[in-house]
Image (tube, rainbow, N blue to C red):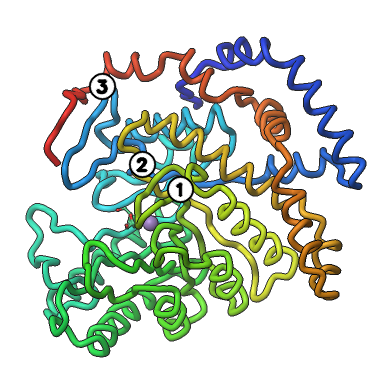
């Protein structure tokens, strides 16, 4: 049974006003691309097949350690979050899966939750475990770390939680477990670097042993925060070494915000793929650290270069090519639905631009050491305004030409402010 939150009539009504202009723009761009030997419909078909998962936790307003500013009509539980995610997918047609986080999204009946999601046009992506936060009633604290804790009972509790996440994920139809641990230190001398990694690897191996055959364990590295001196899985080097030790089902997940400043992330992507260990992404953008800003809002060129490497990898797969794509952002000052609509468009746009790169010209320039023409092969694709391709792909799939205008016309958030228990008092204490 379908239970979609935005009426198809409203989307059609909003689209009607922009349809003629869209056809004109699409035809003009089609002529422009044809002169380069590129068929616009083929690019549109790639965009139509492209998708990125949205994080259940991104549906609510985020906050910092200083304050959180809720808005009226925010979701208060996984059911309301799913409803909001359905709005994003209805309008964008690019976000058909939700990545849940446990225990935040815990319910008593996961088969029912899966059906509920399906009735909203949604499925589930990677399940995320949470061993970075203590929960009420929990036997052991994570104050000493989780999978790497010196306390055996704490490590056992963290392993057990991850195994529980796999079980929940099986019921939801997921195939990936994403493991990020906040384990690390704030002081030199606080922990032994080698022994804490040993403990992590032993505990992670227990989680790995519980993975079904067709599942992957995605190891997410992060350089700092909440630990500010050292982190157990701090960088892609630690991540790939751990994944290699754990086995073939262990892969690395790249959160774009989890690197040292100015690191060449696109090169990391190519390296991980080279060794068959590229498992997935958490898309976001940043200026200073793990800022969790909206994808493409600060450095869209970097996002394009990441997709350029992904398409190189897709064309020359090593040990398979199936990275899972997820958004992971904190929407502190916007309506989260609007941020995720805008982010999904930015991500699909960079995918489309990278699909336009003349690979023969790029590779020929690389082989003949023609530096400028190699760069121009990328530049020519980056400079194309792909908006008509994205909009046409959306419209043909029942989505909106202008996702934000249609969302605002639906007055969805205002309606939810009447229905939901969230209060949106303004300044709140985190
Ligand atoms: C940690 O900063 C992270 O990127 C991990 O993916 C977490 O699961 C997520 O943010 C939510 O806290
Ligand atoms: Mn992340």
| Residue at left offset 29%, top offset 28% | 74
Compared to 238, does 65 lie above or below? above
Specify which label sits upstream in the sequence, 1 or 3.
Answer: 3
What is the number of the mark on residue 327?
Answer: 1
Marks 1 and 3 in Cβ contact (< 8 Å):
no
Left or right, residue 423 beside residue 224: left
Q: CA distance from mark 1 to mark 2?
A: 8 Å
Q: Quadrant of ligand 2?
A: bottom left
Q: Quadrant of residue 415?
A: top left
Whether ligand 1 has any atom under 8 Å from the Cβ at mark 3 is answered as: no
Q: Secondary structure at mark 1?
A: strand
> How far separated are the C-alphas under marks 3 and 2?
16 Å
- Assess disc 3: are there few (<14), some (14-19) or many (≥20) residues with their C-alpha within 10 Å of its C-alpha: many
To which residue does mark 3 refer? 72
Q: Residue at 47%, 52% (x, y): give it.
A: 283
Q: Position of residue 83 (x, y in %)?
A: 40, 29
Mark 2 close to ligand 1, CB under 8 Å: no
Image spot of residue 56 (x, y percent): 36, 43
The answer to which of marks 3 and 2 sits earlier in the sequence is: 2
Asked whether disc 1 touches disc 2, contact meaning CB atoms under 8 Å apart, the reply is: yes
Circle 2 residue: 58
Residues tagged 3 and 2 counted as in contact (Cβ below 8 A): no
């Amino acid at each position: 049974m379908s239970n979609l939150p935005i009426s198809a009539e409203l989307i059609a009504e909003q689209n009607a006003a922009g349809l003629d202009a869209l056809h004109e723009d699409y035809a003009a761009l089609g002529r422009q691309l044809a002169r380069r030997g590129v068929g616009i419909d083929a690019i549109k078909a790639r965009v139509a097949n492209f998708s990125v998962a949205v994080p259940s936790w991104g549906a609510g307003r985020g906050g910092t350690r200083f304050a959180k500013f809720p808005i009226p009509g925010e979701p208060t539980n996984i059911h309301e979050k799913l409803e909001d995610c359905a709005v994003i997918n209805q309008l964008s047609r690019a976000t058909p899966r939700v990545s849940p986080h446990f225990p935040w999204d815990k319910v008593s009946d996961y088969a029912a939750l899966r059906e509920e999601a399906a009735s909203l046009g949604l499925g589930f992506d990677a399940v995320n475990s949470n061993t970075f936060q203590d929960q009420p009633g929990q036997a052991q604290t994570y104050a000493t770390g989780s999978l790497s804790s010196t306390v055996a009972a704490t490590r056992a509790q963290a392993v057990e939680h991850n195994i529980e996440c796999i079980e929940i994920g099986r019921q939801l139809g997921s195939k990936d477990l994403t493991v990020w641990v906040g384990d690390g230190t704030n002081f030199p001398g606080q922990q032994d670097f080698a022994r804490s990694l040993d403990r992590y690897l032993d505990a992670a191996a227990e989680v790995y042993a519980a993975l079904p055959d067709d599942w992957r364990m995605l190891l997410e590295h992060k350089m700092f925060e909440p630990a500010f001196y050292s982190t157990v899985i701090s960088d892609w080097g630690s991540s790939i070494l751990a994944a290699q030790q754990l086995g073939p089902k262990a892969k690395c997940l790249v959160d774009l915000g989890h690197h040292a400043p100015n690191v060449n992330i696109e090169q990391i992507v190519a390296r991980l793929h080279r060794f068959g260990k590229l498992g997935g992404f958490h898309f976001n953008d940043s200026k200073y650290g793990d800022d969790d800003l909206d994808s493409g809002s600060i450095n869209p060129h970097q996002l394009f270069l990441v997709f350029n490497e992904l398409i190189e990898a897709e064309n020359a797969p090593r040990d398979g090519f199936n990275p899972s794509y997820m958004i992971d952002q904190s929407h502190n000052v916007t309506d989260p639905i609007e941020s995720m609509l805008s982010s999904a468009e930015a991500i699909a746009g960079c995918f489309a631009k990278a699909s336009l790169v003349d690979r023969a010209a790029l590779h020929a320039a690389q082989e003949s050491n023609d530096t400028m023409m190699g760069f121009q092969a990328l530049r020519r694709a980056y400079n194309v305004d792909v908006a008509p391709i994205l909009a046409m792909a959306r419209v043909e799939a029942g989505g909106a030409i202008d996702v934000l205008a249609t969302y605002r016309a639906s007055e969805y958030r205002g309606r939810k402010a009447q229905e939901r228990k969230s209060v949106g008092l303004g300044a709140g204490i985190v």
